[in-house]
Amino acid sequence: MADLVDIDVEEEVASLQSGALSDWPSWDFCLLYNSAPYKSIKLAAPSPEAAADTMTQLVQRLNAIAQGLNYPPLFGWASGCC
């Protein structure tokens, strides 16, 4: 697997998670890279659909960052922990 040390996943998650998160349930996701588990992520959202939308946005951002750093844009996600 590529060494993706230049990509700060936590910073990108934090930038997408704002507002009164403590009032919302949290949802578990597995961030994938090249179809392999990369990192477990917990997102706060009002519904599973909203959490999935946020995860899709995160993957789009991470793939854009990866491309800018000359890594293949191979991020994806699955529901549940890795």
Image (cartoon, rainbow, N blue to C red):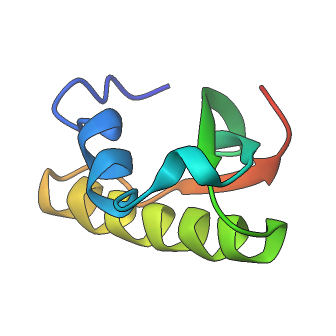
Q: Is residue 5 left or right of residue 3?
A: left
> Foreground residue, 4 or 79?
79
The quadrant where residue 53 appears: bottom right
Q: From the viewer's perspective, is residue 64 above or below residue 11?
A: below
Residue pictured at 26% horizontal, 56% vertical: 15
The quadrant holding residue 29 is top right
Q: Nearer the viewer, residue 40 or 70?
A: 40
Front residue of this view, candidates 78 and 73: 78
Q: On the image, which quarter does residue 76 sit in? A: bottom right
| Quarter of the image with the C terminus in it | top right
Percent coordinates x, y for residue 27 in the rendering: 75, 46
- Going by the image, does 71 lie left or right of 39? left
Decide: is 35 above or below 67: above
Residue at x-position 63% and y-position 37%: 42
- At 23% from the left and 23% from the top, the residue drawn is 5
Q: Is residue 41 left or right of residue 37?
A: left
Residue 74: percent from left, percent from top: 51, 55
Q: How many marks?
A: 0
- Which residue: 39% across, 29% down? 2
Residue 33 in view, yes or no:
no
Would residue 50 be visible to someone looking at this image? yes
Where residue 77 appears, as percent x and y from the top left, is: 69, 53
Q: Position of residue 48 (x, y in %)?
A: 82, 66
| Figure check: 42 above or below 24 | above
